[in-house]
Image: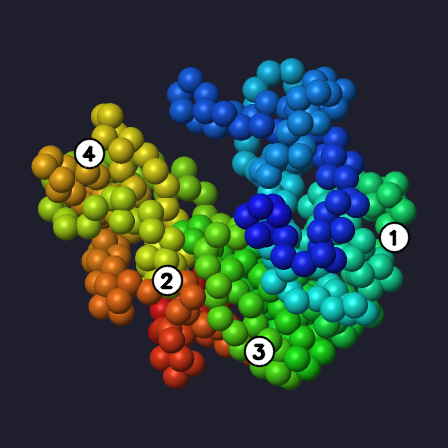
């Protein structure tokens, strides 16, 4: 991290050097594709493979620490499940802490705990009396509290919805989210000091991330910009989600009887993070998934109303698109792509965010050029 300039200040260098990451990772899951291509997880722990475990703890990587909210556990063979908690790669954690521009004596609210490694770094840097964190999962919250205490750190560690903040310790000079919410909650504005900074990696239904920093002007207003798309965390567990499988099965059946249309949009284009952020603003609630049919890889878009679209590579560098359901989802995607090109293919840094108790408004280049809003579980085009 020092070599790639992630660690920029001596205060955070000292904190990283003082906090042992392995204390917060007694076991974790390492992922690998199964025989059918679906991700499987193998447990790595200090009890089973101590040398490998210790080496991996200090790699600059994200390690999954929980599957299916704790329902899926290690049973001696590779398991499958949905990651619901992780220890994010230290490079991203430290970058966010550096981006907070924390000064001595500042109070911090950390929304989300996870492994609580980042909580320990904050305690080491500021002193635990200035650190408050909220973790939604009671089991994770308790384990984190124990591991922090084993190193002598005793911050205010509460269990509950981090979106509600922790009003009895407010106001805070800095608020940092170590999970990815869909929007910045009004409570965080209310619990910030004037001039305070809120830092969060926001995510929408297409899993496009926007790493944002806003400055609080009052309990009713904060403004700032997106930085880039490289910082991501586990999404909000309470964000509304549709079951991909339930939407995908009827779409696949309908796809088999659809001839499709030629498209000039290459599937690889829809992997550009800043473009997907723009598409996400237009397609509120739409999900995306990769799926191969008859050996042909496809990028699928699925909406809870039953609308769907699938983009597949064709011959000679062409693409073919299929769609169905009550509305033409693909035409909305094409419109978003066209607007993105028309705006000069903006990177995330050209987007800004204005937060009020009523909404999170997204704008391009300047606040008067509003292009959409972020809402719980959704992004919406205006």
Residue 256: mark: 4
Give the label, 2 or 4, closer to the camera. Answer: 2
Give the Cα distance between marks 1 and 4.
Answer: 58 Å
The Cα atoms of the two marked residues, 4 and 3, are separated by 49 Å
Give the residue number, with chain letter if any, for mark 2: 347
> Callout 3 environment at 10 Å: few (<14), some (14 to 19), or many (20+)?
many
- CA separation in Å, label 2 and label 4: 37 Å
State which mark lies toward you, 1 or 2. 2
Q: Quadrant of residue 67?
A: top right
Callout 3: SS: strand
Task: Indicate the position of residue 91 as horizontal and vertical percent values.
Answer: 59, 47
Q: Earlier in the sequence, mark 3 or mark 2?
A: 3
Q: CA distance from mark 1 to mark 3?
A: 31 Å
> Sequence-wise, which precedes: disc 4 or disc 3?
3
Q: Quadrant of residue 368?
A: bottom left
Residue drawn at 22 percent across, 58 percent down: 334
Q: Nearer the viewer, mark 1 or mark 4?
A: 1
Q: Earlier in the sequence, mark 1 or mark 3?
A: 1
Left or right for 46, reference 186: right
**Can you say which quadrant of the picture contains the C terminus?**
bottom left
Q: Residue at x 21, y 46 (%)?
A: 266
Indicate the secondary structure of the residue bearing disc 2.
loop
Q: CA distance from mark 3 to mark 2?
A: 22 Å
The label number, if any, that marks residue 232 in the structure image:
none
Look at mark 3 in the image and give the residue it sits on.
Answer: 222
Q: Give the x, y percent position of residue 42.
A: 59, 23
- State the residue in front, 82 or 217: 217
The mark found on residue 154 in the picture is: 1
């Amino acid at each position: 991290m020092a070599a790639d300039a992630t660690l920029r200040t001596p205060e955070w260098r000292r904190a990283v050097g003082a906090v042992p990451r392995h204390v917060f990772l007694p076991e974790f899951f390492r992922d690998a594709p199964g025989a059918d291509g679906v991700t499987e997880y193998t447990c790595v722990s200090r009890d089973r493979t101590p040398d490998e475990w210790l080496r991996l703890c200090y790699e600059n990587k994200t390690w999954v620490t929980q599957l299916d909210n704790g329902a899926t556990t290690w049973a001696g063979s590779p398991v499958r499940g949905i990651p619901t908690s992780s220890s994010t790669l230290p490079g991203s954690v430290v970058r966010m802490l550096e981006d907070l521009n924390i000064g001595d004596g500042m109070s911090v609210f950390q929304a989300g705990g996870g492994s609580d490694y980042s909580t320990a770094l904050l305690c080491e840097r500021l002193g635990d009396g200035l650190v408050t964190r909220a973790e939604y999962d009671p089991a994770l919250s308790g384990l984190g509290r124990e591991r922090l205490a084993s190193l002598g750190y005793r911050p205010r560690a509460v269990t509950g919805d981090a979106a509600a903040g922790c009003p009895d310790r407010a106001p805070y000079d800095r608020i940092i989210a170590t999970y990815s919410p869909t929007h910045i909650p009004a409570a965080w504005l209310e619990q910030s000091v004037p001039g305070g900074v809120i830092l969060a990696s926001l995510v929408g239904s297409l899993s496009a991330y926007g790493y944002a920093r806003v400055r609080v002007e009052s309990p009713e207003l904060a403004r700032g910009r997106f930085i880039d798309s490289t910082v991501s965390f586990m999404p909000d567990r309470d964000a509304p989600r549709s079951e991909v499988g339930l939407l995908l099965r009827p779409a696949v059946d309908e796809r088999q009887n659809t001839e499709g249309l030629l498209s000039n949009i290459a599937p690889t284009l829809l992997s550009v993070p800043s473009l997907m952020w723009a598409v996400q603003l237009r397609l509120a609630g739409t999900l995306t998934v990769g799926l191969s049919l008859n050996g042909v890889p496809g990028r699928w878009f699925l909406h809870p109303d039953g609308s769907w679209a699938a983009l597949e590579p064709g011959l000679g560098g062409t693409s073919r698109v299929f769609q169905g359901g009550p509305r033409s989802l693909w035409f909305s995607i094409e419109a978003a792509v066209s607007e993105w090109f028309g705006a000069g293919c903006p990177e995330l840094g050209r987007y800004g965010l204005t937060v009020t108790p009523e909404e999170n408004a997204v704008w391009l280049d300047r606040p008067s050029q509003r292009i959409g809003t972020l809402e719980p579980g959704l992004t919406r085009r205006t």
